[in-house]
Image (cartoon, grey):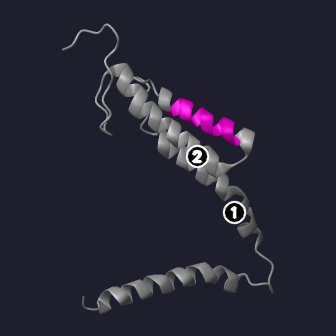
Amino acid sequence: MPFDVHGALLVAVVAGVTALIRFLPFVVFGGWRPTPKFVVYLAGVLPCAIMAMLVVYCLRGVDLLGPTHGLPELLAGAAVVGLHLWKKNTLLSIAVGTALYMVLVQAVYCVIFQKPSPLGLRPQARVGAQPP
């Protein structure tokens, strides 16, 4: 396999720019100067603002008039909030909420509404149901 000079240069430039972006704040706001109050303020408010934007982004397409009425999203969101208040572990809360949402959407929805699952799960026939 021949060596791809263009690809290697591209990777080197991307790595250099990434390193520059990472190290630039330490050069600009080094130990000899106090951090500006505006940067300290942003460090305090941006995490909450980013999380709020992510919640709005995730819930923007919820159809409250659809067949599930937004219940999978509501239950998964409540699980994330409840688990985070209980365990104070962001990664655990998000992982459990995501898994619960996927189970609710893929398994429960498909069984209740007798729809085929995008993951290939087949709805089980209900006891006493007439075959099509």
Badge 2 density bin: few <14, some 14–19, many ≥20, Cα 10 Å: some
Coordinates of residue 128 in the picture (x, y in percent): 31, 7
Q: Is residue 67 above or below residue 8?
A: above
Which quarter of the figure has residue 114? Answer: top left
Judging depth in this view, the residue of 123 and 14 nearest the camera is 123
Q: Would residue 41 be found to the left or right of residue 55 on screen? A: right
Judging depth in this view, the residue of 105 and 73 nearest the camera is 105
Q: Which residue is mark 1?
A: 42
Which quarter of the figure has residue 31? Answer: bottom right
Is residue 74 highlighted in magenta?
A: yes
Coordinates of residue 88 in the picture (x, y in percent): 73, 46
Residues under labels 1 and 2: Cα distance? 24 Å
Q: Is residue 132 above or below residue 40?
A: above
Which secondary structure, mark 2? Answer: helix
Q: Would residue 25 be found to the left or right of residue 122 on screen? A: right
Q: Is any part of residue 132 visible from this angle?
A: yes
Q: Which residue is mark 2?
A: 94
Q: Would residue 93 be found to the left or right of residue 59 on screen? A: right
Coordinates of residue 16 in the picture (x, y in percent): 50, 86
Quarter occupied by the C terminus: top left
Residue at image coords 71%, 63%: 43
Instruction: Give the main secondary structure of the magenta stretch.
Output: helix
Residue at image coords 39%, 26%: 109
Q: Is any part of residue 63 visible from this angle?
A: no
Is residue 2 highlighted in magenta?
A: no
Quarter occupied by the N terminus: bottom left
Q: Amino acid at mark 2?
A: Ile
Coordinates of residue 122 in the picture (x, y in percent): 30, 29
Q: What segment carries the magenta color?
A: 73-84
Looking at the image, tell me whether mark 1 or mark 2 is earlier in sequence order: 1
Residue at image coords 65%, 38%: 81
